Amino acid sequence: MELKDLLNHASEWLKGSGPNSDIVISSRIRLARNLSGVPFPHWAGKKQGEDTLNKIREDFSRIDCLKKATFFELAKMDSIDKQLLVERHLMSLDHAQKTNSKAVVIDGEEIVSIMINEEDHIRTQVMQSGFNLYEAWNIINKIDEAIAKELNFAFLSDWGFLTACPTNAGTGMRGSVMLHLPALVMSRAIDRVLAAIAKLSFTTRGLYGEGTQAMGNFFQISNQISLGPSEDEIIESINGLIRQIIEQENQARDVLFSKNSPLLEDRINRSFGILRSARIITSQETTELLSMVRLGCDLGMVKDIDRRRINELFIITQPAHLQKLEGKKLSAQERDIKRAQIIREKLNIQ
Amino acid sequence: MLCNICNKNPATVHLTEIIDGQMSELHICEECARKKSQAMEQQFGLSDLLAGMADFDKPKNETAAVASLVKCPSCALTYADFKKIGRLGCGECYNTFKKYLGPLLKRIHGSTQHTGKFPLKAEKVLKKMMNIQELRIRLNKAIESEAFEEAAKIRDQIKGLEKKEPGKKE
C-alpha cells in the first residue's frame, strides 16, 4: 500500500453505515501493550528504542493477520505524509511529532493501525463505522492474541498490562465513540450532557483526540478507568452511556424539527449553499457547515447527497489531504482556495 | 467593553483568577480566551496531576525524601523521576514502587485488581503454578498417609513442571 492510494478511497470507518450511523460516526478500541524487560519508549536510549523497533518489526513479520499490513517508519516520512495519517485518525499527533525509532503499521482497509514506540511500545487500534464497539473488540482481541504469541508483554496478575502511564494500566484498553450531536448543541443542552459524562468518569474530546477542542458538533467519548472492570464490562458501560446520549440527541432533533422546522431548514440549506458556491473557505467553517448538511441528510432535508460523501469531505478537506491531492506544499490561503474547489466538485452533482 | 488583552475585540469571556490569594478579574475576547486556556493546559498537564497525586500516596512513616530515592533496579528510574514526568520507566517499575503505586492506582481507577484478559503466556504460567500447588497438596497428603511410592511420583511431576518455568525465555 502506498500513501497516495489512501486518497482515493474512504476509510472503513467513514462509510457512514453500521448501527446508529446517523448520530455515531465511528467506534474505536485501542490496547496499550509493552514488552517485558524493556524500558518504555520515553525512558529508552536511542539504541534501545531502535532495538525495540527492529524486534517488533521482525516479530510482526511472522504474524499472519498482519502480513498484508504496511509498515511505515516515521523517520523516513515527510511531514505532510505524517500529517495525512493523523488526519485519517491512523496515528496520534504526538506520535507524528517525535519520530525517533517510531513506526505505524496500517492495514489496507484502515481498520487496524498499530503505533510502535508511542507512549507505550505497542498501541493497537481498530476502528469501525457506526456504533459497534463489540465488533471492534472482536477484531482487536484476535490481533492482540496473535501478537502475544510472538512477544512477552509486561504484565502482573493483579495490575494487568503495565503501561508507561498508570492511568492506562490493567486492560490497557480505551474504547471511544465519535458522536455528531448538532441538536444538543443547538438546543444548548450539550453542557448539561457533558457535565454528566465527566461525573461518570468518562472523558470527552474533540475530533482529533487528546487536547483537541470539540469542533463542528463532534464529540469523542471514552472510558477513563482501565483497571478493575473487564474489557466486556468497560464496553458495556460505554455502550450504556452512548445509548442514553443517542436518545437525548434524537429527542432534541425531534423538538427542533417539529417546533423550529423553517429555521432549521433555512440553516441547513444556507450551509449547503455556501459550501456549493464558496471560493475561499477555512477548515473550521467547512467543518461547521458540513455538520449542518450532515444533519440535513439525517433528517431527510438534504436528499441528493449521501452521508458517506459528507464524511469523506470532513477528511479530504484537511490541510495534508489538500496538499497531497495538489501534489505540492500550499500556503494557508492556497489551501482555503483548493478546499473550496474540492467541496464544490464533490457537492455539485447533477 | 473591549478585551483586556488585545484591546480590539469585544470582551465576551469573563474570567476570575485567584493567584496567591489575590483575586483579579479579566474580561477578554473569545480568541484571547482560547490562547489563554491553551497556555493554562500546557502549564498544568496530566503529569503534574499525577505527580501531585503520587505525593499523597507515600506510606505515612516514610519521608518524601526516602521515597524519592527508591530506584528501579531494571531501568534506574527513581520515584522522584516518576513524580517529575508522570511516566514509569519499565514494567519492572511497577514491582519496585509497588507500595506507592497501589494507592495511586486505587485513586485513579477505584480498584487494584485486574479482572480483564491475561496474555496467553501468562495464562499458561498461571495454570502451571496452580497445577504445582495442587500437586504439593497431594504430595503432603501422600506423605502423611505414608504412601511413599505415590509421593515419589508426585514429586517427580512437580520437578518436571518446575523445570520449564516462568520468567526464563523459551
Image (cartoon, rainbow, N blue to C red):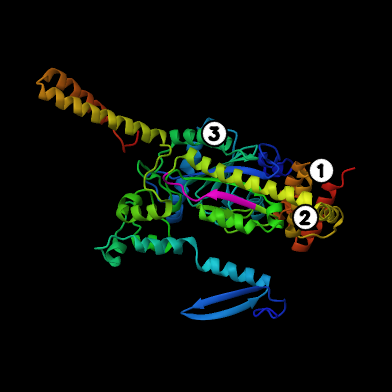
Report the Cα–Cα distance between label 3 and label 2.
35 Å
Where residue A293 appears, as percent x and y from the top left, is 78, 50
- Dividing the picture into quadrants, the one containing residue A127 is top right
Report the Cα–Cα distance between label 2 and label 1.
14 Å
Q: Which mark is residue A289?
A: 2
Q: Amino acid at mark 3?
A: Asn
Residue at image x 30%, y 30%?
B128
- Dividing the picture into quadrants, the one containing residue A187 is bottom right
Residue at image x 65%, y 48%?
A248
- Give the chain letter at badge 2: A
* Same chain check for tags 3 and 2: yes
Q: Which residues are magenta?
A: A219-228
Where residue A250 appears, as percent x and y from the top left, is 69, 46
**In the displayed image of the protein, which residue is found farthest to the front?**
A259
Q: Which residue is mark 3?
A: A138
Q: Residues within 10 Å of mark 1 (few under 14, many from 20)?
A: some
Mark with earlier residue (3, 1): 3
Report the Cα–Cα distance between label 3 and label 1.
32 Å
Mark with earlier residue (2, 1): 2
* Same chain check for tags 3 and 1: yes
Q: Which residue is mark 1?
A: A305
**Secondary structure under the numbered disc 1 in the rendered image:** loop
